[in-house]
Amino acid sequence: MVEQREYERQEQRRGRRHAYESVDPRRTALIVIDMVPFFVEESGYCRGILPNIIRLADALRTSGGTIAWVVPGSDQPHPDLTREFFGEEVAEIFRTSGGAGPISERVWAGLSPQAEDLYFEKTAYSAFFPGSSDLPSVLRARGIDTVLITGTLTNICCESSARDACASGFRVIFIADGTAARRDQDHNAALHNIYRSFGDVRPTDEAVSLLSA
């Protein structure tokens, strides 16, 4: 959660708690990052956010928005560096963490991805890092200006994607209870970083209300 003192700091700075007080659902995309069996099966935190991602996807589909599923790709742009950093065994585990086959079948089945949704592999922690995936260019071509960030891990791939989405000119709304980390400390620190400098931070209930306003 974001600390009260940080809310007060932003309220003093811009005169309101939240950066983005309205959204156009037709120009909004829900970005779901790395919700694949490799992460979901081993993490109660990940399983805990499944209902919130489903709610957001349903709300956005109803209001004419876009759903984009992002999974880890097996192509590593710097494999030697990755092996040096993680070691051979862990580097290979991460390389294959996104699974194989159609992306729609690699996303956690309980999230019920639809044929009309968008699907991407990424080759970096961030889905918005230049060259990592086609996600930013596809969103721009659709007129998307706002992204709702969900998935795992909060403080790694989700935070990295939010930072790069902001740097790429998208309005970022980071879903506090739609992202999952391995520890509360990691999760809360990431929420603080995003809210302070890169995007808005909202719970699912507030995001759904924005979409239906």
Image (cartoon, helix red, strand yellow):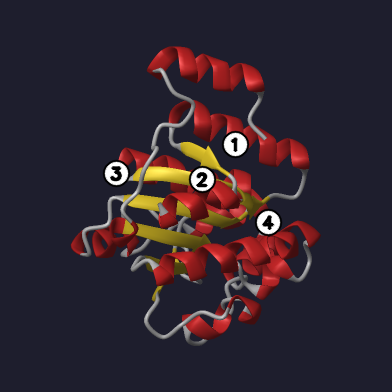
Q: Residue at coordinates 61% horizontally, 48% vertically from top-left?
A: 154
Name the mark nearer the viewer: 1 or 3: 1
State the mark number for residue 4.
none
Is residue 69 rendered to the left or right of residue 167? Answer: right
Question: What is the distance, in whole Å, between disc 3 and disc 4 at their CAs?
Answer: 32 Å
Is residue 68 rendered to the left or right of residue 184? Answer: left
State the mark number for residue 191.
1
> Residue 207 at x, y = what percent?
50, 50
Name the mark nearer the viewer: 4 or 1: 1
Question: What is the distance, in whole Å, between disc 2 and disc 3 at their CAs?
Answer: 15 Å
Asked if residue 71 shows in the view, the reply is no
Q: Residue at coordinates 57% horizontally, 65% vertically from top-left?
A: 55
Report the number of numbered marks.
Answer: 4
Q: Residue at coordinates 69% horizontally, 65% vertically from top-left?
A: 39
| Residue receiving disc 2 | 174
Name the mark nearer the viewer: 3 or 4: 3
Is residue 169 rendered to the left or right of residue 51? Answer: left
Q: Nearer the viewer, residue 90 or 153?
A: 153
> Residue 168 at x, y = what percent?
29, 44
Tell me the kind of residue under disc 3: Ser
| Residue receiving disc 4 | 87
| Residue receiving disc 3 | 168
Q: Are marks 2 and 4 in contact (CB under 8 Å)?
A: no
Question: What is the distance, in whole Å, between disc 4 and disc 1 at their CAs?
Answer: 30 Å
Q: Nearer the viewer, residue 56 or 212?
A: 212
Q: Earlier in the sequence, mark 4 or mark 1?
A: 4
Tell me the kind of residue under disc 4: Gly
Neighbours of disc 4 within 10 Å: few (<14), some (14-19), many (20+):
few
Q: Are marks 2 and 1 in contact (CB under 8 Å)?
A: yes
Q: Is residue 91 above or below residue 169?
A: below
